[in-house]
Image (spheres, coloured by chain):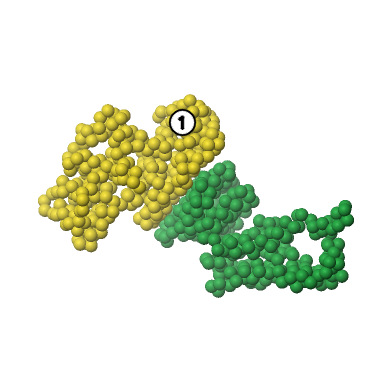
């Protein structure tokens, strides 16, 4: 008979992010046929009683398990990929998955440097025989299209020169548009967010707070895409720390879970330190500790190694 | 690259020495007046790489940018064409684009022209040069200085990074030809689907779509877009399509209007010659001759004079100068 703590350890090994390979080896590996049978009988959520008198793996759970086993492999592949190919593939996948993943396109367009985004667009040509903006435009409609196509087409000025008077008046323009409802339909909002340089937008962010009393992303709660856009452009570390927090919850859907790999792999060489700091400030616990508690096995070790680089 | 060189009309002598060129140019500026003939005989017969080295050596030897010297010494149309010609093509496009955002109407055309007739990477290098020179992005300036339908069309055009392969999806061509026809029949000329197709599809794909349009609906798309001949936006859309599919025809028309003083684009002649001499001027000349029954150099000689005329003729490849 399988011992109750072994059962518990096994269940734990299968849940969460990734698989605890050692547990599977040390426990499962030793079990005789009767122990495995009692495991099957004792887990009706994983094994269904078949009419022909045997316990059958539930297909859905096998698929879930497959994803968990693949998490480490996916992280490795993504990590070793050229950043241009990586971003191009992430964008393509997000497009195919549909509206719930469009935030990833915003993430790529807004948190990469101008040269990195150009690189992703070049890789897109090679990988998919199309331009990124053509694909985005084809799959997305309405106001979101205007925003997303413009975001992926941007080649923002990266110098520090900015005109503060323009930033001030554009902050006012944004405030008026947001107050009047449906800011995503406003041409001026789109113009400002999709063409201005990041330093310029930071200046707008400051002036906005002076005008409204609130931060601009707080006033944009009603408009998810614009909110994501502003967060990615003006406060990227906070944005990433939030995404990580959601990904590390129990029982989240597939796409939210995948964000853990994506954010860590794509930011490990960039601003991981700032993201870790923000995470600690927001949640009182270090990101490493949270990952230690939530993920398992090789996948967990890989992630911890990535975020430990460069302090 | 080979095809491109074959289409250029620039004539370059065997082995010019850039050091000597810089010295001769310096001489041309000294004393009373300027030896424009000497300037033409050198600059009009040097390619991009050579002009770059001459500028470098001139600056190192005389402590001044050649362009500044030219600006001081020359005036009017002649100065403009020499200045434009001497600039590196990417800088030139960035300069022209910036100038266009600051002026009024006909300058939407310059922006569209640059966005549609350069290669994908070429357009991108212009955007880089724009950052460096004007401390802003091209799309930011275009967006700021345009509005309404013009902004809707021009911003995506200057931001595009079109796929440059020859692959064509015929099913897509068929469905998008249908969409275009629908929107045009509804007179929805600024419809986002129409704009999407024109501003994101590769040139090869667009060609296929427009051929399909012609076969399927009997008229070329530009014919169907002529419903209101005076509408400025429609004119721009038609010109965009021309630039994307048969640029030499677009440039021929621009030259024809400029030479016959019919257009409102006063610097068109200078701009077209300076920007296309090293690209496809030969093809444009053929098109001009075909359409007007008179060779381009004759038409230019008739319409212009002095050093300006000489420089133009030298650039389009006419024998002497």
Frontmost residue, A280 versus B59: B59
Residue A148 appears in view = yes
Instruction: Give the x, y percent position of residue A89.
Output: 56, 54
Residue at image location 37% in from the left, 54% down from the top = B129
- Locate residue A275, reporting x and y percent: 58, 67
Which of these two is toward me, B169 or B125? B169
Farthest residue toward the top? B218
Q: Residue B190 placed where, x, y %? A: 49, 36
Q: Residue at x 72, y 58 (%)?
A: A64
Q: Residue at x 46, y 60 (%)?
A: A199
The chain to which mark 1 is attached is B
Tell me the residue at 60%/52% (across/down): A94
Name of the residue lying farthest toward the left = B32
When the figure is inspected, residue B37 is found, relative to residue A158, above or below; the finding is above
- The answer to whether B295 appears left or right of A284 in the picture is left
Q: Check disc 1 and report the residue beneath it.
A: B221
Q: Quadrant of residue B174?
A: top right
Q: How many marks?
A: 1
Mark 1, secondary structure of its residue: helix
Chain letter, yellow: B
Chain appearing in green on the rendered image:
A
């Amino acid at each position: 008979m399988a011992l109750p703590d072994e059962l518990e350890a096994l269940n734990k090994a299968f849940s969460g992010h990734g698989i605890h390979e050692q547990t599977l080896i040390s426990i499962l590996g030793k079990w005789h046929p009767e122990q495995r049978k009692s495991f099957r009988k004792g887990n009706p959520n994983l094994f269904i009683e078949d009419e022909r008198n045997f316990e059958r793996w539930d297909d859905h759970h096998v698929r879930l398990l497959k994803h968990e086993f693949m998490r480490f492999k996916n992280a490795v592949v993504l990590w070793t990929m050229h950043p241009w190919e990586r971003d191009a593939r992430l964008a393509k996948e997000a497009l195919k998955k549909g509206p719930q993943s469009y935030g990833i396109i915003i993430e790529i367009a807004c948190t990469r440097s101008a040269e990195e985004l150009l690189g992703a667009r070049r890789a897109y040509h090679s990988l998919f025989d199309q331009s990124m903006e053509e694909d985005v435009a084809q799959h997305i409609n309405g106001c979101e299209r205007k925003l997303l196509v413009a975001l992926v087409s941007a080649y923002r000025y990266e110098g520090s020169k900015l005109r503060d008077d323009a930033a001030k008046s554009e902050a006012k323009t944004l405030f008026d548009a947001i107050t009047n409802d449906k800011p995503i339909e406003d041409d001026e909002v789109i113009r400002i967010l999709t063409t201005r340089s990041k330093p310029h937008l930071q200046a707008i962010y400051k002036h906005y707070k002076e005008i409204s009393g609130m931060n601009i992303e707080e006033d944009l709660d009603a408009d998810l895409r614009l909110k994501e856009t502003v967060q990615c452009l003006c406060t990227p570390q906070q944005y990433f720390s939030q995404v990580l927090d959601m990904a590390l919850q129990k029982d989240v859907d597939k796409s939210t879970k995948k964000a853990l790999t994506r954010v860590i792999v794509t930011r490990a060489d960039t601003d991981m330190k700032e993201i870790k700091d923000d995470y600690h400030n927001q949640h009182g616990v270090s990101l490493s500790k949270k990952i230690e508690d939530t993920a398992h096995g090789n996948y967990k070790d890989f992630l911890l190694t990535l975020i430990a680089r460069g302090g | 690259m080979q095809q491109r060189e074959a289409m250029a009309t620039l004539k370059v002598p065997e082995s010019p020495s850039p050091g000597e060129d810089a010295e001769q140019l310096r001489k041309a500026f000294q004393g009373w007046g300027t030896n424009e003939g000497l300037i033409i005989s050198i600059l009009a017969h040097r390619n991009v790489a050579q002009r770059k080295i001459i500028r470098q050596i001139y600056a190192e030897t005389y402590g001044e940018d050649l362009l500044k010297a030219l600006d001081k010494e020359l005036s009017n149309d002649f100065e403009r064409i020499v200045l434009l010609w001497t600039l590196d093509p990417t800088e030139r496009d960035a300069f022209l684009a910036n100038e266009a955002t600051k002026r009024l109407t006909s300058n939407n055309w310059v922006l569209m022209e640059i966005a549609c007739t350069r290669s994908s990477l070429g357009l991108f290098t212009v955007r880089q040069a724009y950052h460096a020179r004007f401390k802003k992005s091209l799309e930011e300036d275009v967006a700021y200085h345009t509005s309404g339908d013009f902004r809707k069309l021009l911003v995506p055009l200057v931001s595009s990074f079109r796929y440059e392969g020859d692959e064509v999806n015929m099913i897509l061509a068929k469905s998008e030809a249908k969409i275009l026809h629908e929107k045009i029949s509804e007179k929805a000329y600024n419809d986002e689907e129409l704009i999407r197709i024109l501003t994101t599809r590769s040139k090869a794909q667009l060609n296929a779509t427009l051929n399909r349009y012609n076969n399927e609906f009997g008229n070329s798309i530009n014919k169907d877009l002529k419903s209101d001949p005076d509408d400025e936006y429609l004119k721009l859309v038609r010109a965009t399509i021309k630039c994307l599919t048969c640029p030499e025809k677009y440039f021929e028309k621009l030259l024809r209007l400029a030479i016959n003083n019919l257009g409102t684009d006063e610097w068109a002649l200078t701009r077209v010659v300076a920007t296309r001499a090293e690209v496809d001027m030969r093809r444009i000349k053929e098109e001009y001759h075909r359409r007007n029954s008179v060779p381009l150099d004759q038409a230019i000689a008739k319409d212009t004079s002095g050093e300006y005329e000489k420089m133009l003729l030298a650039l389009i490849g006419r024998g002497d100068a």
